[in-house]
Amino acid sequence: MTGRTTRGARQDLIADHVLREGSVTASQLAEAFGVSLMTVHRDLDELERQGVVRKFHGGVSAQPSSVFESNVAYRLRTARAEKAAIARFARTLVEPGMAVMLDDSTTTLGVAELLADAAPLTVITNFLQVINAMSRADRVRLIALGGEYYPTHDSFLGVPCIEAIESLRADVLLTSTSAASGGLTYHQEQEIVLVKRAMMRSANRKVLLMDHTKLGGTALHQLALLTDFDDVVVDGGTPADVVRALRDRRVNIHVAPLDTP
């Protein structure tokens, strides 16, 4: 292999390692891959530029923070059982003939994979993975929202995307976000917030899908009040006192059981 190919292959392996572990030190990576710290830092600089990881002093992480949204590849690996349970419940909210809007969250990807038997449908989305999945579905009219492509999210954002959303009206929006607490929802990135808000304005029914790991946290940007959503779906791992507190705030919350086949 050429030096360039070797670097590229090593960076792919490093990215996979960090995504799997969540957070590691540069020294651990140097030892694991048999390269110098300088080489590791160069590789991490490139992976950070691609939006795969974020560097911190002495190491690197794929985990989200209050100002950093994790790469879609990392999010696809997390809370799989919880997201699957939520997706099964969300599927029951979709009826044949509906226009369904899906954002670029990995939870809604799980819903998309269950929509084939709800056809005929119109599916509206900015998430490339949902676009690819729905393009193979029978009796599904697919409306792909364009814009500027963001590799970290594998989706299209920006002014063109928002303008496309504003020209449409969906029966139901299925969306997620990074954190919720104190009656508010949050996300780390303003580009994502602006697109999600536009989607909310363009839907008759707004459904928020959130696994329990996101409850009790905050992020840089406020998205909306929890009561701005017609329904909030959480998984069965959500503590009962949290569910009661949300209902006390008049949040229309549904708990998706984890043991549903």
Image (tube, grey):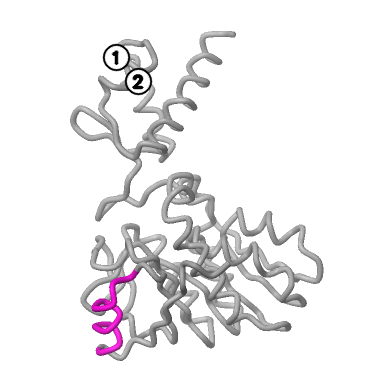
Contact between marks 1 and 2 (CB within 8 A): the answer is yes
On residue 38, the disc is 1
Q: Residue at x 30, y 91 (%)?
A: 250
Using the numbered discs, state the Cα–Cα distance from disc 1 to disc 2 in whole angstroms. 6 Å
Left or right: residue 32 versus residue 114 is left
Q: Would you identify the image quadrant in which residue 234 lies?
A: bottom left
The magenta-colored residue range is: 238-248
Return the residue found at the far right. 138
Q: Quadrant of the N terminus?
A: top right
- Mark 1 residue type: Met
- The quadrant holding residue 185 is bottom left
Principal secondary structure, stretch drawn in magenta: helix
When the figure is inspected, residue 18 is found, relative to residue 231, above or below; the finding is above
Which type of secondary structure does the marked residue at label 2 adopt? helix
Residue most extreme to the top: 2
Element under disc 1? helix
x 68%, y 54%: residue: 132
234 part of magenta stretch: no
Query: Residue 231 in the image: x percent, y percent?
Result: 44, 84
Q: Nearer the viewer, residue 162 or 16?
A: 16
In the image, residue 164 sits, relative to residue 151, either above or below, namely: below
Q: Which mark is residue 150?
A: none
Q: Is the C terminus in the top left, top right, bottom left or bottom right quadrant?
A: bottom right
Seen from the viewer's position, the closer of residues 177 and 162 is 177
Q: Is residue 161 left or right of residue 15?
A: right
Q: Position of residue 59 (x, y in %)?
A: 25, 30
Q: Which mark is residue 42?
A: 2
Residue at 67% over, 70% down: 115
Asked if the stretch drawn in magenta spans residue 243, the answer is: yes
Residue at x 28%, y 65% (from the top left corner): 221
Q: Label 2: how many residues lie within 10 Å, few (<14), some (14-19) or many (20+)?
A: few
